[in-house]
Amino acid sequence: MMSAGLEIQLIAAVTAIACAIPGVFLVLRKMALISDAISHSILPGIVIGFMITQDLASPWLILLAAFSGIITVVLVELIQKTGLVKEDTAIGLVFPALFSIGVILIAQNANDVHLDVDAVLLGELAFAPFDRLIINGADVGPKSLWIISGILVLTLVLLLAFYKELKISTFDIGLSSALGFSPVILHYGLMSVASVTTVAAFDAVGAILVVALMITPAAASYLLTTDLKKMLVLSVLFGVISAIGGYWAARALDASIAGSITTVLALLFLLIYLFAPSKGLIAVLIRQKRQRTEVSLLTFLLHLNNHDSIEERRVAHLQEHINWQKVRAQTVLDLAVQNNMITINDKVVSLTQKGLEFTEKALEYIITNKDEKIEDMKDDFFLFRG
Amino acid sequence: MDITQYFTDYTLRTITLGTAVLGAICGMLGSFAVLRKESLLGDAISHAALPGIAVAFLLTGAKDSNILLLGALVSGLIGIWWIRGIVSKTHLKTDTALGLILSLFFGFGMLLLTYIQKQPNANQAGLDKYLFGQAATLVESDVILMSFVTGVSLITLLLFWKEFKLLLFDRNYAMTLGFNVKFIDGLISFFIVLAIVIGLQTVGVVLMSAMLLAPAAAARQWTDKLSVMVLLAAGFGIFAGVFGTSISASQSNLSTGPVIVLVASAFVVVSFIFSPGRGILFKQLRLLKNRRELELQKTLSFMYTIVRKHDDISRPHAIKILNNFQGFTKSTLAQLSQKQWITINGSNWSMTDQGFNAATNLYDSNKVES
């Protein structure tokens, strides 16, 4: 028998893993928002399930909810196929309509029971340990832990069985259909897994956290690696870290657990977004700045190459002639001097032998656009790395 | 329900006016969102507005709806700015960026809301109306604010019409012409966020995206002209607001927001099916007509190849010989004889001069050209 706190962490962590795996494929297939759509449009399924069974704990609710998730996907597909609107518009048309039907159904039929939209959308992890699975009179743990673990196992089995197919169809849909994997079956398979996971997870943690758990770890790990396996592992890791971190943060703040897990996810993503080694914002900005300087350098060297007269090569004149601001001109000059491409004598700039060769090569590359001309320059200059 | 109620019942009048104005501004600006392929922006931004509402409440401690909306506006703008940052600076795609901002901001907002609920001053009741929207809480000053915002965005739209249009359809051209693309982009994003924020109170976070999208998607089907589309979308939005309000007022237990969304969705369905140019119905009809035409041509060309081998074009042939390669159907024969291109005599057909000329025109000229 575990303590409630441990059980909550376990449920959150398992949910995070179960969400992260389909999430990676959704992000890679540019379908991240389908998880948002599903998480909203399962509402009518739940309400109808409740109207039929009059039991909030019935497994029919989950089945019907997952079914309405798949209906969402089918409807989106149908609308998209008419070619009247783009895919994102199709998503945006389908799920609010289904959600509205759900809200109206609740207001009409289920107002007197504990089935309010808040609970469906936001979930309450803190209550999950109270709903226990009893087998032969023995308490074997929280029900949601069993459900989500079962779905995680199913997801893992499917992932291992169809890893190759999923990988190929995600990155090259043409190749995958040429190899005989049906993209349609894989698409609907993935969507079904996403839908079932969403339903099971939202039962435990609420709709919005499901979306966060699906998209954020995948997006964060996509900024760190382009290797699918590494991406899966990292996503699972990020999910678990934020699930457990979020639980403790919620305890410290005495606030919603789902909200604080999402917040931890947000902080994690922000950190990676800013500091990821090659794709983070700071790295990108530095690279862009460096590239800009290098373009300026090239312009500058070409200018020197074209003008022989001392008058044209005076430092002061260059600034005026090429019309750079002082700072940038200085950076470019420094960079050129550092690379031994120019010498400055008496405020007159002249190209060195190395600078001359560099300019010729760059010029040739610009004219012919042949990559082999610049092979040896790639190490020193971002500009030529594409 | 009585029509005079609209003039006597304060609540009903206010809500109807409010939802109509909301429909108008959403349709207008939604057109741009849809054409910019940013349909789900509304969804993301309406979720992203939540932490702003919570922070505004935490800072001021007051439940003044204008201050809360200002908070929502600020956090919506931060959200849209970050979405653009993610899309332009990393290789993450738009849908991922939207999903990230949507869920992360909303989750953070929920954290703040639950934190607020634990605070001793119990003044927070009603903050959650922004989640699901409650048109019933609209008061006259809200409607005035909404009308003001609509007016300002209308004027801006008219002032920058050319720029907006150019940016929409040929961004690169706009850049080469020297327009400040970033500014115009920012301007339109700002107004879209503004429209979303003023709709939060009425239809709530989840349904806001449909308000922005459905009228525009419906209007798109009826026209290829931007100005007509914007006007139509605004019209659809107004109708959805007014109809939705009156339906929900006529029944108890029918929340206004979802009904408005369903009315707007009904417009979309009708437009998808019945619009003359793009609608599914007329497309199918055209397809059917083309198929019939094709069958007719098949029969005619088959007959023509037979007839050409003979000197006497009107020599009767058995219908049976057309049966090779399924060259005819009953209806094509009937149509051909109705056009008097062939005459049918018992189980024989023979081509008329008229039919032969038509076939020569059709097939021989094709042959020469190819």
Image (cartoon, rainbow, N blue to C red):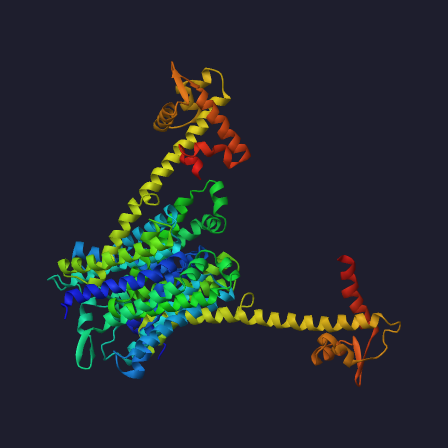
* Residue furthest out toward the top: A346
At 31% from the left edge and 63% from the top edge, which residue is drawn?
A19
- Residue B364 seen in the current view: yes
- How far from the left and from the top, in percent, is residue A250? 17, 60
* Residue furthest out toward the right: B311
Q: Is residue B316 depicted above or below B66 in this figure?
A: below
| Quarter location, residue B361 | bottom right
B348 to the left or right of B282: right
| Quarter location, residue A54 | bottom left
Q: Nearer the viewer, residue A87 or B30?
A: A87
At 38% from the left edge and 57% from the top edge, which residue is drawn?
A27
Q: Is residue B326 depicted above or below A312 in this figure?
A: below
- How far from the left and from the top, in percent, is residue B69? 26, 57
- How far from the left and from the top, in percent, is residue B358? 78, 69
Q: Nearer the viewer, residue A157 or B117?
A: A157
- How far from the left and from the top, in percent, is residue B101? 31, 55
Q: Nearer the viewer, residue B201 or A371?
A: A371
- Residue B237 seen in the current view: no
B259 to the left or right of A373: left
Count of numbered marks: 0
* Residue furthest out toward the left: B120
At 48% from the left edge and 24% from the top edge, which residue is drawn?
A357
Q: Is residue B235 depicted above or below A379 in this figure?
A: below
| Quarter location, residue A94 | bottom left
